[in-house]
Image (cartoon, rainbow, N blue to C red):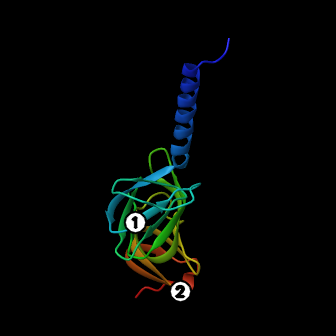
Amino acid sequence: MGFGIRDCRAAALLLGFLFFMGWGSQAQSATKVGVLSEVRGTVEILHEGEVSFKSVRQYDDVFEKDKIRTGPDGRAKILYDDDSMTVLAENSAIEIRQYELTQDKKRKQSVIGLLQGKLRFIVTKYLSKESSNFRVQTPTAVLGVRGSDSVAILEGDTTKAYHCLGIWRSPIPSLVRNW
């Protein structure tokens, strides 16, 4: 008994389906951490394991290890599953390096890398009063925040941080002043 044309077609369809499902779910193997709640202008995302950025739409899912960038006319808001939010201005880029949540969607540890531009982060307050569990890293600074609204701007080799509301913690206590 040999294989007929009908058997070859069925096998090709099955292999094609399995390939497509495996390829399409590559980004889905990462942990979903939020959603793009607002997208304006040029906004692109690079999922872990992919080789090129792709345009996004409002309400697209965001995963741990994703890189997101905006163009000169772009702006993006990411609403995370713990109700924290980041807002990317034009010509900005971030990497979601770590975003760990408990089963009840409370943040364990989060690290957002600001690769270029401006980032506003509005962080919900969870867990211990003693430690900051939300960090924004740039090549020149690490900002630890808890229950606050802040902005980080990366300009060349300089990081500027503006604290709007809430608790800001510096790894160097002498940098914190009560004005």
Q: The C terminus is located in which quarter?
A: bottom left
In the image, residue 165 above or below residue 108: below
Residue topped by disc 2: 156
Q: Is residue 33 shown left or right of residue 87?
A: right
Q: Determine whether the residue tagged by mark 2 lies in a helix, strand or loop.
A: loop
Give percent across and percent down for residue 8: 59, 24
In the image, residue 57 above or below residue 75: above
Q: Amino acid at mark 2?
A: Gly
Q: Is residue 144 shown left or right of residue 147?
A: right
- Residue at horizontal 53 percent and vertical 78 percent from the top: 170
In the image, residue 139 above or below residue 65: below
- Residue at horizontal 54 percent and vertical 26 percent from the top: 9
Q: Is residue 26 shown left or right of residue 62?
A: right
Q: Amino acid at mark 1?
A: Val
Q: Which residue is most to the top?
A: 1
- Residue at horizontal 41 percent and vertical 81 percent from the top: 162
Give percent across and percent down for residue 88: 40, 71
Q: Which residue is most to the front?
A: 5
Q: Determine whether the residue tagged by mark 1 lies in a helix, strand or loop.
A: strand
Residue topped by disc 1: 43
